Amino acid sequence: MLRLIALILTCSSASGFMSTLAPAPRLRASTTTTLSAQLSRRDVLTSTTSAASAALVASLPLDAWAADPKLGTKDRPIVVLGSSGKTGKLIVEKLLSLNLHTLAASRSGTSTFPPSPYLTNTQVDVTSPSSLTSTLSSCSGCVFAASASKNGGSALLVDYKGLSYTAQACVDNGVPKLVVVSSGAVTRPESVGFKITNVFGRIMDYKIAGETELRRIYSTSKTSHYTIIRPGGLSSSPSTGASSVEVSQGDILSSEIGREDVAELVVASLTAGGKTDDVTFECYGTGGETLFGMKTGPAKLSKGLESRDELIHRSDSFEGLVTGLLTDSEMAKKGIVSTYTGKDIEPM
Ligand SMILES: NC(=O)c1ccc[n+]([C@@H]2O[C@H](COP(=O)([O-])OP(=O)(O)OC[C@H]3O[C@@H](n4cnc5c(N)ncnc54)[C@H](OP(=O)(O)O)[C@@H]3O)[C@@H](O)[C@H]2O)c1
């Protein structure tokens, strides 16, 4: 059913433009190499200083300094909320592959991952503020990949209130960065994608209500920041590299994207530091949908929307895709951001 929703969500415009691209080369290896270098510096910097470690630091590439050495340490791991979910699991795996200490947080607290010295499993219910506070009190970053589920709670409880509680707990506990997996089309209630998806527990209304409350909470914080990622319809296709992905802003364009690519963008947003502070962006595959065997290309969510080239980002690295994005305040001045904040939303 989700797959059907994914197709509808991202194939909803009759005015979508067609694009067919040759398969892009796999670029994950080079991306991982750069980040591994960053982590080597981080590991050295957070261990006992010695002449040997100083020499190792000096020998690493200059751009390696970009990584925050305080991110994903043993004492201050990165927490992934909803780690048992399909995207959450991939995010945890990606963080572990970079030797970043990770707290995999799920409702059950049961591990679904192979043992790793960088992994700790924990039990967190995002609908419980106290459960969040105890987990977030010593984290260097947080990812919100939870969403309504049969036993975990409705969209009202998880996507709206759960996200709001998470944002508040991050700000209260000085967590430097919260990265949220939301959804494309949340600000476009006129789009077919919004309408069809919203049938399921009004999930789109509650997702935009959660985003709105999050922005309100962060507006008073100078030290904690957020990134909101809005993917198009999700698929389980393996990543074929950043060149097969487009990032844009304004909630205008969409198409299908693999969860693995979303996980890459989540991690790139976390490691990008200030470049992704207080930023919202959409992400989708450049190939578009596979609809009846045809690739449709990214499409406008609805006919009247204006797509601006300056807001579309392409790169051969995931770090490049999240570089040069505009903050939400800067985007507000562009005159294309929808002011939709959800219909008939219960107060917090
Ligand atoms: N499907 C699409 O096409 C599409 C398109 C755009 C955006 N998105 C969004 O992308 C995100 C990731 O999607 P996905 O398919 O990877 O999600 P998913 O597999 O449905 O995972 C959601 C996770 O949230 C957890 N959860 C539910 N209630 C919770 C609670 N109270 N406390 C803690 N965790 C809780 C669930 O755990 P339990 O299973 O234990 O309850 C589950 O592991 C979601 O926000 C989704 O709405 C999806």
Image (cartoon, rainbow, N blue to C red):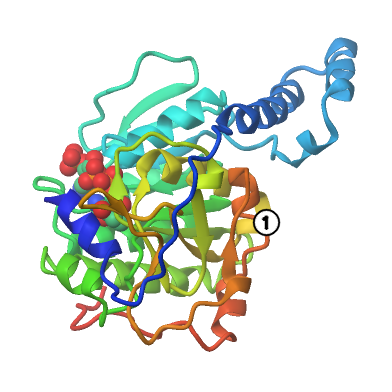
Residue found at x 32% / y 71%: 186
In the rendered image, residue 258, in percent from the top left (x then y), is placed at 36, 43
- The residue labelled by disc 1 is 274
Camera-side residue of 79 and 232 = 232
Judge left or right: residue 174 versus residue 179.
right
Camera-side residue of 45 and 243 = 243
Judge left or right: residue 195 versus residue 19.
left
Name the amino acid type tagged 1. Gly
Residue found at x 11% / y 65%: 201
Camera-side residue of 20 and 233 = 20
Label total for image: 1
Judge left or right: residue 117 versus residue 113.
right
Secondary structure of residue under mark 1: helix
Q: In this view, does 235 lie above or below 113?
A: below
Residue found at x 27% / y 34%: 84
Say which quadrant the C terminus sits in: bottom left
In the rendered image, residue 259, in percent from the top left (x then y), is placed at 36, 42
In the rendered image, residue 65, in percent from the top left (x then y), is placed at 79, 37
In the rendered image, residue 296, in percent from the top left (x then y), is placed at 34, 59
Asked if one can make out residue 25 in the rendered structure from this viewpoint, the answer is yes
Judge left or right: residue 271 versus residue 147.
right
